[in-house]
Image: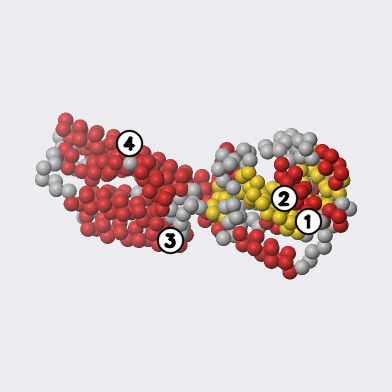
């Protein structure tokens, strides 16, 4: 569960952490000395980097790049000569420099996205993090644009000591604090919602886990990522137990398929997925399946890495009508007579040939309580709990 939470947090990292050094420097430098502002800022930077290193291992390099950029911007603010700058701009010079920097970041957005994507771990959902990053840049750019323009114009037409300018700066800081508070609350609420949603592992063609994604997001792009699927064939007396999938099924409505089939959730073991699915579908669990095969199945609707299991005992208590339309025991001859009729799922057609080659159909059952089965499970469970 801890690994699961960490991956969600990394997939939706709070973008404000990238801008804290700059915001702190602007505020502290306005009220105190530059040296004091720098001491506070770099203490905060070290603390955040250490925090991200231990809690968000895959994020801290990405965060480090942001802090290098922040250091450059702060250096420009400190060392920019001021003798030629008009007084109406001088009071908000730091904001002007920051505004120009943010505009440059937005202009170079595509290049920055490419740079970060190529240098961060592939299992991170960096697309979302970068999108959130640029949302904050846009918000701060608008705020700085309005404030600097209003301050400069007001300075030219009002007395430099006018209370209006003081009030304007107070409003600016008030909006900035509101923006920071709002963003922290928003990210917290989004993370809370994400923890309640279903996440699927993203795997390679060899079954290695390289990331995770929300199930709904993956369904919107069904062939972009490959996910692990558990499928279980039930046999007895040389017959195969098949279910007719619900008409509401998003992949194979109204088609006959094997007894159990489901996505493995993030941080869920293969055996846990089988127990969960058998409990949801038939009201039973604690099966003793045998790994029959592993294969990749890809079409226009999905891209999956299949773990195919065999079970010879399933004492069905009830059938979940919302998931299953009907069930039936099929003889080998009945299946072969209808194999090309289109009433079976693509997966089952492939798996039926695998099952015939295995030799289990002739016996109608299998016996397996050996150490090999335990080794298989140990290997599979490690795959989904990196």
From the viewer's perspective, is the residue at label 1 or at label 2 nearer? 1
The vertical placement of 19 against 363, above or below, is above
Labelled disc at residue 53: 3
Q: Which residue is drawn at 82% across and 60% down?
A: 366
Alpha carbon distance from label 4 to label 1: 66 Å
Compare marks 1 and 2 and give the one earlier in the sequence: 2
Q: Considering the image in quadrants, where does the N terminus appear? A: bottom right
- Callout 1 environment at 10 Å: few (<14), some (14 to 19), or many (20+)? few
Residue 305: percent from left, percent from top: 64, 50
Q: Which residue is drawn at 36% across and 41% down?
A: 109
- Callout 3 environment at 10 Å: few (<14), some (14 to 19), or many (20+)? some
Compare marks 3 and 4 and give the one earlier in the sequence: 3
Residue 182: percent from left, percent from top: 42, 43
Compare marks 2 and 3 and give the one earlier in the sequence: 3
Residue 200: percent from left, percent from top: 60, 49
The residue indicated by pointer 1 is 358
The residue indicated by pointer 4 is 142
Residue 172 in sight from this viewpoint: no
Which picture quadrant has residue 87?
Answer: top left
Q: Considering the image in quadrants, where does the C terminus appear? A: bottom right
Q: Are marks 3 and 1 in contact (CB under 8 Å)?
A: no
Q: Which residue is drawn at 45% across and 50% down?
A: 13
The residue indicated by pointer 2 is 231
- 158 or 105: which is nearer to us? 105
């Amino acid at each position: 569960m801890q690994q699961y939470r960490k991956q969600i947090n990394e997939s939706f990292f709070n973008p404000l952490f990238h801008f804290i050094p700059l915001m702190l420097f602007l505020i502290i430098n306005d009220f105190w000395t530059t040296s004091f502002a720098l001491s506070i800022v770099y203490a905060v930077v070290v603390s955040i980097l250490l925090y991200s290193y231990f809690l968000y291992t895959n994020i801290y390099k990405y965060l480090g790049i942001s802090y290098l950029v922040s250091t450059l911007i702060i250096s420009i603010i400190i060392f920019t000569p001021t003798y030629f700058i008009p007084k109406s701009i001088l009071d908000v010079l730091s904001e002007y420099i920051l505004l120009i920097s943010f505009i440059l970041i937005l202009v170079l957005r595509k290049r920055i996205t490419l740079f970060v994507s190529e240098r961060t771990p592939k299992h991170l959902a960096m697309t979302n993090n970068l999108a959130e990053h640029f949302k904050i840049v846009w918000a701060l750019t608008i705020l700085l644009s309005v404030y600097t323009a209003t301050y400069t114009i007001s300075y030219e037409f009002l007395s430099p000591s006018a209370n209006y300018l003081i009030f304007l700066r107070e409003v600016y800081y008030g909006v900035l604090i509101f923006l920071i508070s709002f963003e922290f609350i928003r990210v917290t609420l989004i993370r809370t919602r994400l923890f309640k949603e279903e996440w699927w592992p993203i795997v390679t063609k060899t079954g290695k886990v390289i990331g995770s994604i929300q199930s709904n997001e993956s369904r919107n792009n069904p062939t972009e990522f490959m996910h692990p699927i558990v499928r279980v064939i039930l046999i007895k007396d040389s017959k195969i137990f098949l279910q007719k999938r619900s008409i509401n099924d998003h992949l194979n409505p109204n088609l006959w398929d094997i007894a159990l089939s489901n996505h493995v959730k993030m941080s869920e073991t293969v055996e846990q997925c089988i127990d969960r699915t058998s409990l949801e579908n038939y009201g039973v669990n604690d099966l003793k399946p045998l790994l029959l095969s592993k294969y990749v199945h890809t079409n226009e609707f999905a891209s999956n890495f299949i773990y195919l299991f065999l079970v010879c005992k399933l004492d069905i208590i009830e059938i979940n009508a919302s998931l299953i339309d009907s069930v039936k025991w099929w003889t080998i001859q009945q299946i072969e007579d209808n194999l090309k009729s289109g009433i079976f799922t693509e997966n089952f057609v492939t798996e039926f040939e695998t099952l015939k080659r295995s030799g289990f159909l002739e016996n109608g059952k299998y016996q397996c309580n050996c150490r090999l089965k335990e080794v298989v499970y140990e290997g599979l469970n490690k795959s989904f709990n990196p």
